Image: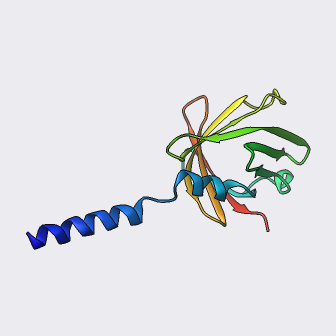
Amino acid sequence: MKFYRILLFVALTTTLACSGPTRKETRDMLCKTWIAYEYELSDGTKKAPPTDTQNDYLKFESDGSFESLEYGILTIQGTWSLDSSGLILTMKQDESSHFSNEIITRIIKVNENELVLERTDLNGKKSVIYSKAKE
């Protein structure tokens, strides 16, 4: 019987240790300005952002709004939300016809310094964006 208690304790503590941040913690960590430093294409190729996007950023505010600078010239504003799991990030905008009105991404990783998002395009191809917190 003692063996089963120990096994149960190990299983519970391992589950809690591996569960990741809560939805609120994820939300709090997102609220800053992020700069992309690498893209991973659907074929696994990793690339640095193009030179004309070096000043681009994605900024999340705690009130649920976001702002994104694209190609150094186009500022997009809209709203953002997390699903109940805290893993799906949805951004909505209606300012630019150059971008989708709704962008849905999966959060692969988020902490105080790094944000990694996965997106599936209209053709079903996945890409990953690696970003660091702006200093």
Identity of the residue drawn at 13% across and 67% down: 4
Displayed quadrant of residue 110: bottom right
Residue 93, above or below 58: above
- Which residue occupies the foreground of this view, 102 or 9? 9
Position of the C terminus, as image quadrant, is bottom right
Name the residue furthest right. 73
Q: Residue at x 70, y 62 (%)?
A: 132
Q: Is residue 45 visible to the viewer in this orientation of the structure?
A: no
Please tell me in which quadrant of the rendered image residue 115 appears: bottom right
Figure quadrant of the N terminus: bottom left
Closer to the camera, 103 or 5? 5
- Marker count (numbered): 0
Q: Which color scheme does this rendered protein use? A: rainbow
> As drawn, is 17 to the left or to the right of 83?
left
- Does 44 appear above or below 82? below
> Is 1 left or right of 36, judged from the image as shown?
left
Q: Quadrant of residue 98?
A: top right
In the rendered structure, the answer to whether residue 54 lies left or right of residue 9 reads right
Residue at 78% x, 64% y: name it: 134
Nearest the eye: 81 or 55: 81
Q: Tell me the residue at 40%/63% (across/down).
A: 18
